[in-house]
Image (tube, grey):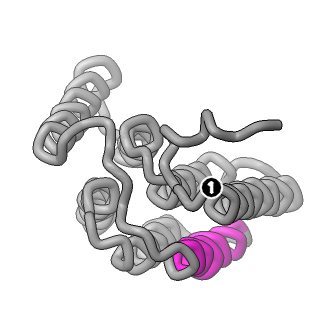
Amino acid sequence: MIEIIINIIMVILATIMIEVRKLLLLPILLAAQGLLFTCSILLEGFSEHVFPIIFFSIFFSPFMVNYIIRRIHLSESNPLLPHIISIALLLLLVFLCISIQFLIFGIVDLNLIIIIIGVYGIIVKTDLRKIIACLSMIFMISHVFLEYLPLELSIILTFLSIFFLSFFIFFTLKFYLVSGKISTRDLKELRF
């Protein structure tokens, strides 16, 4: 029962994270989600796979999102959809995912819904800082699928997540320093 409550709170935090306008709340929400995610894994039983999850979801990911938000002092770029429409579409998407999972499989996996919320955020939001937060959320939840792998492979995949997220943060900072913008709409200005 506690696991279900924790997963529901994580879905709510993911939804809030996608739609929050105050960007300084993103690292706090991400750290809270990481803490809840770690608690939900610890409720299933302690294993050595928890250590990479703790490092990535509670420490590294919120720290890096906080770093990029504090480095770039711009307001959030306009999303593809207006705020109210985006919230309504996101809630409809969550409801459809829950319904389809229940009707087809007879169970509801809220971790999959959080991944879908993250992908939605990557598609709809144009602010690169929000996209970084969505990627962090997806990488964090993807650790659920790493529990069945050997510890060495789990650590390697965690460091690949860290590398990819660090590269994306570097790219965002470099793009901001070159163009002064952080919207995905402005990426067409890049010349390679």
Query: In terms of image quadrants, where is residue 2?
Result: bottom left
Q: Residue at x 59, y 49 (%)?
A: 142
Query: Is 71 in front, or is 86?
Result: 71
Q: Is residue 116 magenta?
A: no
User: Is 115 in front, or is 25?
Assistant: 25
Whether the magenta-drawn stretch holds residue 57 is answered as: yes
Q: Identify the image quadrant of the N terminus.
A: bottom left
Left or right, 137 with respect to 51, comes to: left
Query: Could you say whether the residue bearing mark 1 is in a helix, strand or loop?
Result: helix
Q: Is residue 65 above or below residue 78?
A: below
The picture places residue 48, in percent across and down from the top left corner, at 73, 71
Q: Amino acid at mark 1?
A: Ser
**Segment colored magenta:** 49-68
Mark 1, other Cα within 10 Å: few <14 / some 14–19 / many ≥20: few
Find residue 118 and report its horizontal and vertical position in percent. Answer: 43, 46
Compared across the picture, whether 79 is left or right of 38 comes to left
Can residue 179 be spotted in the picture? yes
